[in-house]
Amino acid sequence: MPYLRHLSASADLITAAEEIRAGFVALALERSRQSTPFVEQARALKISAMHAKRPNELLEIEGIQTALLTAAGFSDKATKQTNEKDQTGAIQDFIERFLEPAGTNFVEELVYRFLLTRGDSLGGSMRNIAGKLGERKLTRSLISTLTLHEITYQWLNTISNTWITGDRSNIDIELSLKALSWNKNGETRTLIYNRTIPLVGKNIDICLLRCAPDEVKHVIQKTPEKFIAFGELKAGIDPAGADEHWKTAQTALNRIRSAFVSHSLSPDLFFIGAVITDSMAKEIWSQLEDGTLKNAANLTNPNQVASLSNWLVDL
């Protein structure tokens, strides 16, 4: 059994208190990293806005209308859904209601409100960042396994949407990777993150396919027998949400199992979690022993993640 390479009992899956603390620190640092562009934008806005002697003169400064809309409370989505006339009216109303009452401090008021909206936007994106950090950790482990075994691989760049041949100089590719493909023993494997699979009807965290990158779309739509494994990755570090994450993962895995059983198929299923409590660990261990799950790992334990990565590469 592949899980026995890194687990000997359910207790091995439980997340240690120090790992939970480290996880919160990692999230805080990532929040700071992602907020840096907003802070720099606010500084640039302040320099430009200081050319205005009165709030109404802000409308005459070229290149800051989008920032003014942001300060007025417009999200990126709201900006795209409104026309120029509506936007100008909203900015004028914002100036009259909030900037003019601030008197000589109107520039500071403008910058504070800009950061308030940007901060709210960042808060929304941070709700998904734990999952991204989890994907990056698994990706780095997979790439390390492939590199160690001198297995050729390619990765799909999120920004350019092109496949790139991996090499040792790609230090931070997990930051912009959304799929990974490798060749082993004359066969190609492709691992994809967060894709909706028509047969299942839902988004799935991790899918491993027996196909080349250019065949992924066809396989997803037409060839269920080429699915090798599915995984649920729950990277949230807050213990208060651990049980809910596990329930969500179980629902997803059961849905996958039922969908493929109807086609007389049984791809391997696995679970990776950042926060695993004692009761969760016992349930996961029970499913490993009866074959419901083929593998599982605690995301905060590098050795377990490395072992599971080796298993995936060997499938």
Image (cartoon, rainbow, N blue to C red):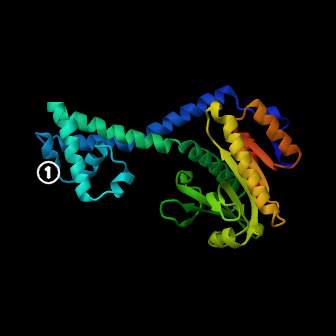
Question: Residue placed farthest to the top in the image?
Answer: 17
| Visible residue check, residue 46 | yes
Residue type, label 1: Glu
In the rendered structure, the answer to whether residue 115 lies left or right of residue 275 reads left
Mark 1: which secondary structure? Answer: helix
Where does the image place residue 204, in percent across and percent down from the top left?
66, 55
Q: In which quarter of the image is the C terminus?
A: bottom right
Q: Residue at x 65, y 31 (%)?
A: 239
Relative depth, front residue between 249 and 126: 249
Q: Circle 1 sits on which residue?
A: 60
Q: Nearer the viewer, residue 119 or 274?
A: 119
Residue sitting at 62 percent across and 35 percent down?
Answer: 237
Q: Residue 246: percent from the left, percent from the top?
A: 71, 41
Kindly indicate the quadrant of the structure image that contains residue 226: bottom right
Name the side, left or right, on which 49 lies relative to 31: left
Find residue 252 and report its horizontal and vertical position in percent: 71, 51
Can residue 273 be seen in this snapshot?
A: no
